[in-house]
Image: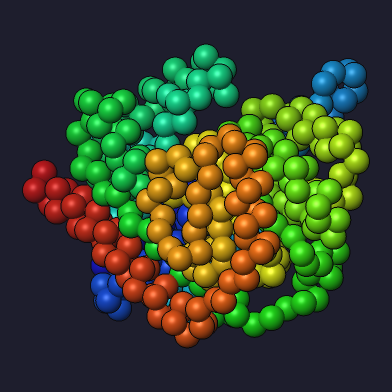
């Protein structure tokens, strides 16, 4: 069987890239992959994409010449980061570079004679000639409509209604997301496949790379947050918790990785950091921006704990929690329902939005050294988790291929 893995819509942000790696690794971890041919369809080359980039550049230059407000910067992962993310799969995965858009995808699926493609963030249409599995990310706009313009809320409603009635199968990141489909899109006809938690470390993550810490000027003791700076990630709560601890622990720092460009609110990050400056903590609460995955992992390994203060996630704890569980790194998570799908001896929860509660958990973690599980055990556990996730993905593929054969 020939399967196309759609990189469309995932390579533009760090969390999407992590999810795409999990999907790829899970498919390959299943015994089914031994008789399959996998192609990663990467929309990063071609005339239409070049024209799109040219138009954006022209628009930006025009606005600058007219003295208008500049376009918000694009802060997705760099080509280097994207290439590094899939370097370990290249002996079992063929990367196909194609142009942006539906026609280029149609040509690629036809040329490669693919049996199915997965995961499609946007509907490929009832007339798409190959079976396809959809991906529904989350319903944040239903819980936090204040984070979205009214038109965006309507657009997301329309998007999910279309996607979940045109797709034959859809994968989601959690049981909570599956329940939200039943709650918010009762007319959905797609069969829903909830992916199990599948934390798994790369073998090279256990090699100590102190030079990566030095490169970013990071030294213990510190806590780390690995989130984009979006309002619902609630960095504000974590920063306030750190402020409560800072006086008693003068050597302690808080390290943040992830894009600082908030597409929905460009002023979010500058305003937040002005608050930090007002506290006199600008040298102790540090935002490194979007950095290579391996650098992020090394920083996490030496942290007192990973903090995940988020108010909403489509999957349990987001990518940072996955990696923390994979490496048996202590993690302190907000107690929202989706995060409660994570379990582990080094996982703790605090009431979402409660800075004082988070500070108490951080204080306790500083006083309680953690002895991590051996690398060999974690790698073995990770392969089991990924294989189980792979079986669910292959079941979704079987569902659409079988349905196409009957139609």
Q: Nearer the viewer, residue 396 or 222?
A: 222
Residue at 63 percent across and 32 percent down: it is 231
The image quadrant where one finds the C terminus is: top left
Q: Nearer the viewer, residue 332 or 382?
A: 332
Q: Give the percent coordinates (x, y) of residue 191.
A: 21, 43
Q: Residue at x 68, y 62 (%)?
A: 366
Front residue of 344 and 201: 344
The quadrant the N terminus occupies is bottom left
Give above or below for 164 relative to 238.
Answer: above
State the residue at coordinates (20%, 34%).
189
Residue 182 location, x and y as percent? 25, 32
> Which residue appears at 34% of the width and 73% of the height?
384
User: Where on the picture, by quarter, is residue 92?
Assistant: bottom left
Residue 62 appears in the figure:
no
Is 234 placed left or right of 62 in the picture?
Answer: left
Please state if 286 lies on the left or on the right of 384 as rendered: right
Q: Please provide percent x and percent y for residue 78.
A: 69, 55
Q: Residue furthest bottom?
A: 376
* Coloring applied to the structure: rainbow
Find residue 354 and report its horizontal and vertical position in percent: 59, 36
Q: Is residue 283 visible?
A: yes
């Amino acid at each position: 069987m020939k399967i196309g893995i759609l990189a469309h819509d995932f390579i533009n942000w760090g969390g999407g890239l992590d999810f795409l790696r999990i999907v790829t690794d899970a498919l390959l971890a299943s015994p089914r992959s031994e008789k399959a041919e996998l192609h990663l369809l990467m929309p990063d080359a071609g005339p239409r994409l070049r024209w799109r980039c040219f138009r954006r550049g022209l628009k930006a230059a025009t606005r600058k010449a007219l003295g208008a407000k500049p376009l918000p910067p694009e802060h997705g992962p760099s080509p280097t980061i994207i290439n590094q993310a899939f370097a370990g799969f290249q002996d079992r995965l063929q990367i196909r570079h194609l142009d942006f858009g539906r026609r280029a995808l149609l040509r690629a699926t036809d040329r490669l004679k693919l049996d199915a493609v997965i995961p499609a963030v946007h509907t490929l249409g009832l007339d798409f000639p190959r079976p396809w599995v959809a991906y529904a990310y989350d319903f944040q706009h239903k819980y936090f409509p204040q984070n979205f313009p009214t038109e965006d809320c309507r657009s997301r409603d329309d998007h999910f209604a279309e996607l979940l009635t045109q797709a034959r199968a859809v994968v989601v990141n959690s049981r909570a997301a599956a329940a939200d489909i039943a709650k918010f899109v009762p007319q959905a006809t797609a069969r829903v496949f909830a992916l199990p938690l599948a934390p798994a470390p790369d073998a090279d993550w256990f090699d100590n790379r102190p030079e990566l810490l030095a490169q970013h000027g990071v030294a213990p003791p510190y806590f780390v947050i690995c989130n984009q700076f979006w309002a619902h990630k609630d960095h504000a709560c974590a920063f306030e918790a750190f402020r409560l601890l800072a006086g008693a622990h003068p050597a302690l720092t808080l390290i943040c990785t992830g894009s600082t460009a908030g597409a929905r609110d460009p002023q979010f990050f500058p305003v937040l950091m002005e608050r930090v400056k007002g506290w006199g903590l600008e040298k102790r609460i540090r935002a490194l921006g979007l950095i290579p995955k391996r650098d992020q992992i090394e920083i996490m390994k030496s942290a007192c704990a990973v903090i995940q203060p988020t108010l909403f996630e489509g999957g349990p704890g987001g990518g940072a929690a996955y990696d923390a569980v994979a490496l048996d790194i202590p993690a302190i998570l907000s107690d929202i329902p989706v995060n409660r799908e994570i379990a582990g001896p080094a996982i703790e929860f605090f009431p979402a939005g409660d800075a004082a509660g988070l500070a108490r958990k951080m204080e306790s973690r500083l006083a309680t050294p953690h002895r991590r599980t051996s690398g060999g055990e974690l790698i073995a556990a990770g392969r089991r988790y990924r294989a189980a996730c792979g079986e669910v993905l292959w079941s979704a593929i079987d569902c659409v291929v079988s349905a196409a054969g009957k139609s």
